[in-house]
Amino acid sequence: MYLTAHSSAGVLIAAKVVNPWLAFVLGFLSHYVLDMIPHGEENIFDKTYHRINYRNLTKALLIDFILLLIYIYFMMTKLEVNQPTLLAAVFGTILPDLIWGFYYLTKWKILKGLTLMHNKLHLLIKHKQLPLSYGLVIQSLTLIVFTLIAFSI
């Protein structure tokens, strides 16, 4: 799931939780729960499905990061929440993907366990590989629903 979709869970958590440490932990855990939902990119590094196109992957990551920054800025200016709590929750929601990416870049053994767990959770719910277009719909709905709920709390 893209960082922007994950961050919407952090926004929702921050709308309900005041303590930044608790918000961070809940955000971190929410990442793994959301990754269990099929979202169209589960096998991004599995070469049995496709070859890795690093140029397209880099473009997608850059676009996602820019959208993430815009979304967080918008939420910080429009939603009445404790901003440190919001940032902690959002950081918790994206940290597992940062760890995952850092592991693939460095192969640090200390990160291997979390990375393997992360990969397994993506495939915990058995399903056929979703087309990315379906995944984008699922992720967009996640973003919209969580954002609307955060504003209604």
Image (cartoon, rainbow, N blue to C red):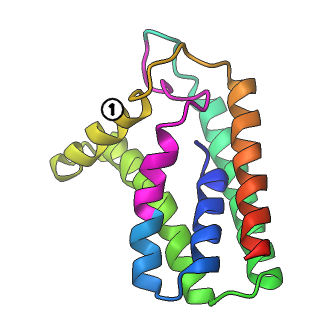
Q: Quadrant of the C terminus?
A: bottom right
Q: Is residue 128 above or below residue 137?
A: above
Horizontal and vertical percent for residue 148? Answer: 79, 63
Q: Is residue 48 above or below residue 72?
A: above
98 left or right, relative to 52: left
Foreground: 89 or 149? 149
Specify the amino acid type for callout 1.
Lys
129 left or right, relative to 115: right
The picture quadrant where one finds residue 4 is bottom right
Q: Is residue 39 visible?
A: yes
Instruction: Give the dominant element type of the magenta stretch: helix, strand or loop.
Output: loop
What residue appears at the point 75 percent right and 25 percent down from the top-left corner?
133
Residue 140 colored in magenta in the image: no
Foreground: 37 or 99? 37
Horizontal and vertical percent for residue 28? Answer: 42, 62
Q: Quadrant of the N terminus?
A: top right
The residue identified by callout 1 is 120
Q: Which residues are the magenta region?
A: 28-47
User: How many discs appear?
Assistant: 1
Foreground: 57 or 70? 70
44 left or right, relative to 14: left
What residue appears at the point 43 percent right and 33 percent down from the top-left corner?
122
Q: Residue furthest front?
A: 153
Q: Is residue 49 above or below residue 124?
A: above
